[in-house]
Image: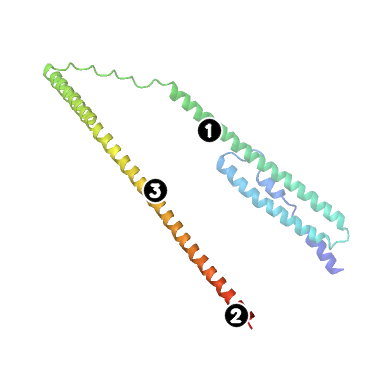
Amino acid sequence: MKPLIAAVLIAAALPVSGSEFGSRHPSGSIRDRAQAEQTLRDADVEAARIEREAAAREAECHKRILVNRCRDEVRQDKLTAQRELRRVRVEAHDLQRRLDAEETAKKRAGSAEQAARPGPATKEPPASREIPPDEAARNRAAYEKRQEEKRKEAAAEQARVPDREANAREFRDKQAEAERRAQEKDAERRKNEERRAERRKQVETKEAQREEVRRKAEAAAKTTP
């Protein structure tokens, strides 16, 4: 009986999960962003504690006589603790969203105010100064000089056209001549190969004829008594 009594006492001594966490964070106690962030971190720790203690209590229930009743009590306590934990988390997230909305509204209001402010006055472009006659004459002379240089360059380019065309014709003629010579050499090479092949054929024919004569002579010699 002693082990059974000890198990019952241990299970009864385990705290109800989440009751203390809810009392530490009553409704309306979260008032700023830093407090909301800290509360959410504490909630993560509390969620792990609830799972850990519920598992320990349920393990102890298997040592008791009324196992199912013990497990039902553990599940009920766990659900109660999780509801309280969820309430605290929702309140913290609601505060974060409300602060985000307020900051966004302030930024939009500031942007609208900035856009409504009159911008700096546009400066009028400086009036064009009148060019003195001597400067105008120098500019005109420089312009005419540039135009004359362009005309000379165009004339020189036009004069080089016949030379380029002649060079192009000469190049084409050289290419045609080289191609003709290559074709002649190729034709000559093929003719030489044909002549060599014909000579080899003639030599082979003569060799075959001599071999035939030799075989006949040997055959005749064998038949002569």
Q: Is residue 170 left or right of residue 99?
A: left
Asked whether the residues under the numbered discs 3 and 2 touch, taking CB atoms below 8 Å apart as contact, a structural biologist would say no
Q: Residue at x 73, y 52 (%)?
A: 17
- Name the front one of labels 3 and 2: 2
Secondary structure at badge 2 equals: helix
Give the residue type that dot 1 points to: Glu
Write down the residue under mark 3: 183
The percent coordinates of residue 202 (x first, y second) are: 49, 63
Q: How many marks?
A: 3
Which of these two is toward me, 201 or 27? 201
The percent coordinates of residue 64 (x first, y second) are: 85, 61
Q: Residue at x 76, y 59 (%)?
A: 56
Q: Is residue 91 left or right of residue 120?
A: right
Q: Residue at x 78, y 62 (%)?
A: 10
Which of these two is toward me, 188 or 92? 188
Write down the residue under mark 1: 103
Depicted 157 relative to depicted 118: above or below: below
Write down the residue under mark 2: 221
Q: Is residue 26 in sight in this rendering?
A: no
